[in-house]
Image (cartoon, grey):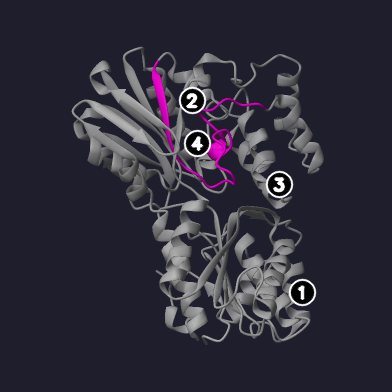
């Protein structure tokens, strides 16, 4: 899974870190997770995750599959395996470098979009998807597939906005370090598909959503900007986001101000019948990857300790706290007695001030390496820290993340300068500490692994 694994596997602790990361990514495989959630008995389709849905397929004249995201092809392959020719038609929008682009999975066409910012191709594909959804009637079942990355990939500008307007505001908010909730409040109010509008387009069809979550806590309204979920945010909320992050975006601001003035319809809220009754089944999320990584740690004789599946905020700020937990475990056996593996998931952000290369996970890894190198005692000398984005692309880079230890940073001034310039990937590349997987076919966001060897190594 990891390129140059032999270079990274410098010690048993490094090997354990790599094994846990690989297990976590494999554990969140969308095709396997979706197959496990589906059962077909005759014409009865049962979908069981945290909740249960039972559908009589004989009650529908058509079954449509629409949606998008990095993990969408895996979900659709599982649907195709279970339903076969019961699926009448479909369109999903995925990253342009996905090998399935231009092909079909059964009756479902796979179209290219843009990530992490929207593209014209993605907008064209989303318009095709919306046309198909609008063709649904009372006798249609619409299976919506929503996975990480769908917010950018499903791009259909609302009103007079252009794809360039969406791209510019998305990039500006990402560079400003906006969290996913803030970013999505703007996206939903600039889109014909997000914030419940896909479900509204499909009304009066029966709509059900299968999701692979890349957000903390798995809220349906946030995953992929909630195309089939009720939206509690407003145009005023979206305007507040632009002000909070000092983003100009004049065309977007004008659009949002018109909406706030009542000149454009709001996104469907919790009381709207088009979205209120749409069930969302999360087949995989951050906890799925963490549990698989924890099982891998146990198999190797290390006690797993899960800090949280919901870590958020600045990547650089989160790193020293994680390292401090590992140091405490190494020195005092709290909160877990070594040999141990400390795990966390969630989504951190980067406040871009420089023009270097990197993403939240490379920045977390380099900040952790700086913290290890400046530890208050020797407790963390053998600790190994790894962080990856489970989709294999950290931010806009081709790296998944980084694998570091106390020896990664030999010159703290140079490392701190790299962080200040947001060039964490450049520094880690020089130290042969960047992790590369290529696209993984899933996306449940960040996975962090801290190995505390104790006496084992």
Principal secondary structure, stretch drawn in magenta: loop
Residue 279 or 446: which is nearer the viewer? 279
**First reached walking from the N terminus: tag 4 or tag 1:** 4
**First reached walking from the N terminus: tag 1 or tag 3:** 3
Whether pointer 2 and pointer 4 mark residues with C-beta atoms closer than 8 Å, the reply is yes
Q: In the displayed structure, does residue 365 sit left or right of residue 77?
A: right
Element on which disc 2 rests = helix
Q: CA distance from mark 1 to mark 2?
A: 45 Å
**First reached walking from the N terminus: tag 2 or tag 4:** 4
Check disc 4 and report the residue beneath it: 154
Labelled disc at residue 417: 1
**First reached walking from the N terminus: tag 3 or tag 4:** 4
Of badges 1 and 3, the one in the foreground is 3
Residue 326 or 280: which is nearer the viewer? 326
**First reached walking from the N terminus: tag 1 or tag 2:** 2
Whether pointer 3 and pointer 4 mark residues with C-beta atoms closer than 8 Å, the reply is no
Labelled disc at residue 113: none
Magenta residue span: 205-232
Q: CA distance from mark 3 to mark 4?
A: 19 Å
Q: CA distance from mark 2 to mark 4?
A: 10 Å
Where does the image place residue 85, in percent across and percent down from the top left? 19, 31
| Residue at the (72%, 31%) spot, across then down | 238
Q: Residues within 10 Å of mark 1 (few under 14, many from 20)?
A: few
Element on which disc 4 rests = loop
| Residue at the (44%, 15%) spot, across then down | 203
Of badges 3 and 4, the one in the foreground is 3
Check disc 3 and report the residue beneath it: 178
Labelled disc at residue 198: 2
Whether pointer 1 and pointer 2 mark residues with C-beta atoms closer than 8 Å, the reply is no
Element on which disc 1 rests = helix
| Residue at the (54%, 78%) spot, across then down | 339
């Amino acid at each position: 899974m990891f390129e140059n694994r032999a270079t990274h596997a410098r010690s048993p602790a490094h090997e354990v870190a790599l094994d846990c990361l690989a297990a976590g990514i494999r554990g969140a495989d969308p095709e396997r997770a979706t197959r496990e959630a589906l059962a077909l008995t005759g014409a009865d389709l049962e979908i069981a995750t945290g909740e249960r849905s039972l559908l009589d397929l004989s009650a529908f004249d058509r079954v449509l599959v629409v949606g998008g995201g990095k993990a969408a092809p895996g979900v659709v392959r599982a649907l195709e395996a279970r339903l076969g020719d019961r699926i009448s038609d479909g369109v999903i929008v995925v990253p342009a470098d996905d090998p399935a682009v231009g092909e079909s999975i059964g009756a479902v066409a796979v179209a290219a979009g843009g990530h992490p910012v929207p593209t014209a191709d993605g907008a064209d594909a989303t318009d095709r998807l919306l046309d198909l959804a609008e063709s649904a009637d009372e006798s249609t079942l619409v299976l919506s597939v929503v996975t990480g990355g769908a917010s950018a990939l499903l791009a259909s500008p609302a009103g007079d906005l252009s794809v360039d307007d969406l791209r510019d505001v998305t990039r500006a908010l990402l560079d400003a370090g906006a969290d996913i909730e803030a970013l999505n409040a703007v996206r939903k109010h600039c889109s014909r598909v997000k914030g419940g509008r896909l479900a509204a387009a499909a009304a009066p069809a029966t709509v059900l959503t299968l999701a692979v979550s890349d957000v903390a806590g798995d809220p349906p309204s946030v995953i992929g900007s909630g195309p089939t979920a009720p939206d509690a945010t407003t145009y005023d909320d979206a305007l507040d986001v632009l002000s909070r992050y000092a983003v100009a975006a004049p065309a977007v601001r004008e659009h949002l101000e018109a909406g706030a003035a009542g000149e454009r319809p709001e996104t469907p809220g919790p009381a709207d019948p088009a979205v209120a009754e749409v069930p969302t089944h999360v087949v995989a999320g951050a906890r799925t990857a963490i549990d698989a990584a924890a099982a891998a740690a146990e198999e190797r004789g290390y006690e797993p300790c899960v800090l949280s599946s919901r870590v958020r905020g600045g990547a650089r700020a989160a790193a020293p706290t994680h390292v401090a937990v590992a140091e405490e475990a190494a020195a005092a056996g709290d909160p877990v007695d070594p040999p141990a593996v400390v795990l966390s998931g969630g989504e951190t952000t980067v406040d871009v001030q420089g023009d270097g290369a990197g993403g939240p996970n490379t920045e977390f890894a380099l900040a952790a390496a700086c913290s290890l190198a400046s530890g208050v005692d020797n407790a963390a000398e053998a600790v190994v820290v790894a962080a990856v984005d489970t989709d294999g692309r950290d931010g806009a880079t081709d790296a998944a993340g980084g694998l570091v230890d106390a020896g990664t940073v030999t010159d703290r001034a140079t490392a701190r300068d790299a962080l200040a310039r947001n060039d964490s990937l450049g520094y880690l590349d020089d130290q042969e500490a960047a992790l590369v997987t290529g696209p993984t076919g899933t996306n449940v966001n960040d996975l962090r692994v801290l190995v505390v060897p104790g006496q084992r190594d």
